[in-house]
Amino acid sequence: MSCDKDEELPLSELKGVYTGTFTVEYSEDPIFYDQMELSNEVTIEFENGDFTCSSGENHIPAGGSGKFQIDGNKINFNDEKGWYGDFDGNLILDGDYEIQERKSAITISANKGIGFYEYRLIKQ
């Protein structure tokens, strides 16, 4: 049995390296930034319930690493790093998000009150 890269796999089997774009669109004036929308390249690696997210310039995104769990179309990240509070803490990949998969691409997103945070990723 073979697996074509474009076949959909259950999200519970999420593993591998995904690269793409992180974007945050603030719904109110951001405290730490001078723009309402910020974007940067990002890489997230998933392996055996662990994740590692790259950090972008000026903490966009901040990154993160730790454990993740998927339940239906929800994904929960439990970041295990220590952080200083000199930026928007929602830029850390942590907490509850919605996840959607289409072929070899995933979108991870959350509305966190002050803004909408989205990771659009393609499996490498």
Image (spheres, grey):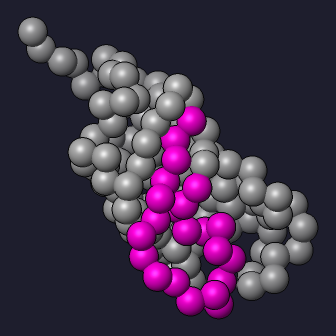
In depth, the one of 76 and 10 nearer the eye is 76
114 vs 48, left or right, is right
Total number of numbered discs in the rendering: 0
50 vs 112, left or right, is left
Kindly give the residue lying farthest to the top in the view shown: 1
Kindly give the residue lying farthest to the right in the view shown: 28
66 vs 72, left or right, is left
Residue 120 appears in the figure: no
Give the magenta range: 74-95
- Is 119 one of the magenta-colored residues? no
Residue 10 appears in the figure: yes
Judge whether 36 appears above or below 5 on screen.
below
Quadrant of the image occupied by residue 92: bottom right
Judge whether 114 appears above or below 108 on screen.
below
Quadrant of the image occupied by residue 74: top right
Judge whether 34 appears above or below 8 on screen.
below
Counting from the top left corner in percent of width and height, residue 84 is at 56, 89
Q: What residue is drawn where x is 75% and y is 82%? A: 33
Judge whether 69 appears above or below 63 on screen.
above
Q: Quadrant of the C terminus?
A: top left
Counting from the top left corner in percent of width and height, residue 76 is at 52, 47
Counting from the top left corner in percent of width and height, residue 10 is at 37, 22
Counting from the top left corner in percent of width and height, residue 1 is at 9, 9
- Is 92 one of the magenta-colored residues? yes
In depth, the one of 33 and 50 nearer the eye is 50
Q: What residue is drawn where x is 46% and y is 65%? A: 79
Kindly give the residue lying farthest to the left in the view shown: 1
